[in-house]
Image (cartoon, helix red, strand yellow):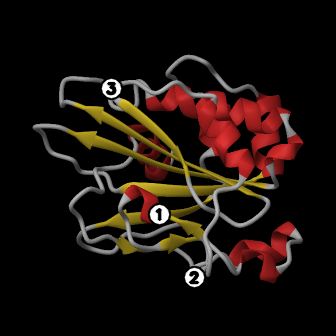
Amino acid sequence: MRTATLLLLLVGAAACGHTPVITGEPPARAGVAAAGGDAASFAEGVDLVPIHIPMFVFGQPAPAPQIQPPSQVLAGLIGESARLKVEALPSPEGTTAVDLIETSTPRQRWGGLMIPAERAMFSAFAADRTLGQWLVIVDDVNVVRGRDPIPTTAYRWQRSDVEAYARCGIPSAFVIDSCTDAFYQLPQMELITAGAKLSGT
């Protein structure tokens, strides 16, 4: 299992109060040809300003960022709690984008609320083609009163990858099985950190 998969399942670190640095591939060009997509469709990126990160991922700043209805639908499937916040993000048409942030202490299981929520969204996205051709998940664990070693992470999957994960079997339990391991090796990934640049895939 790659280190990136393990980091994903531990999830990101807190973004609040940081001056983030985006890393990874240049805005969404590498996956366009392989996916058969039009480069123009990736001109506008996913806006992180609503979650207090002044940047766009997987594309360039949009002149008038808009939250797509499918993003609202997917975010609305997950009930929020005192420890889990779920928010739709502005994105280009055809891209569903959702941010999740879980607040945990060093003693709590990181991702204990967020990972089941993400898996529910994967299942819903795979089952409904009206939700778009691309899925972007931005996730983060805000560790209270403890070391927060993992940066906020943004992932982008093609619909076909999410549908394949559903066919393989999305586990409801907090486990890393072979289907999950394979799924998390597929997306374009961008890491956001307050310090050194990290490598994306």
Nearer the observer: mark 3 or 2; the answer is 3
Q: Secondary structure at mark 2?
A: loop
Compared across the picture, whether 68 is left or right of 76 comes to: right
Of tags 1 and 2, which is closer to the observer? 1
Would you name the residue on which mark 1 appears? 48
Q: Amino acid at mark 3?
A: Ala
Say which residue label 2 marks.
Answer: 26
Label 1: which secondary element:
loop
Check contact, mark 3 vs mark 2: CB within 8 A.
no
Quadrant of the drawing holding the C terminus: bottom right
Q: Position of residue 179 (x, y in %)?
A: 68, 33
- Relative depth, front residue between 127 and 4: 127
Q: Give the Cα separation between the discs numbered 1 and 3.
A: 22 Å
Does residue 38 appear to the left or right of 143 in the view shown? right
Which label belongs to residue 69?
none
Residue name at image x 39 percent, y 24 percent: 81
Disc on the earlier residue, 1 or 2 = 2
Q: CA distance from mark 1 to mark 2?
A: 17 Å
Residue contact at pointers 1 and 3, CB within 8 angstroms: no
Callout 3 crowding tier (Cα within 10 Å): few <14, some 14–19, many ≥20: few
Find the distance from the CA under tag 3 to the CA under tag 2: 36 Å
Q: Quadrant of residue 183?
A: top right
For mark 3, give the secondary structure.
loop
Residue behind mark 3: 82
26 above or below 20?
below
Percent position (x, y) of residue 75?
A: 60, 38
- Residue drawn at point x = 31 percent, y = 51 percent: 150
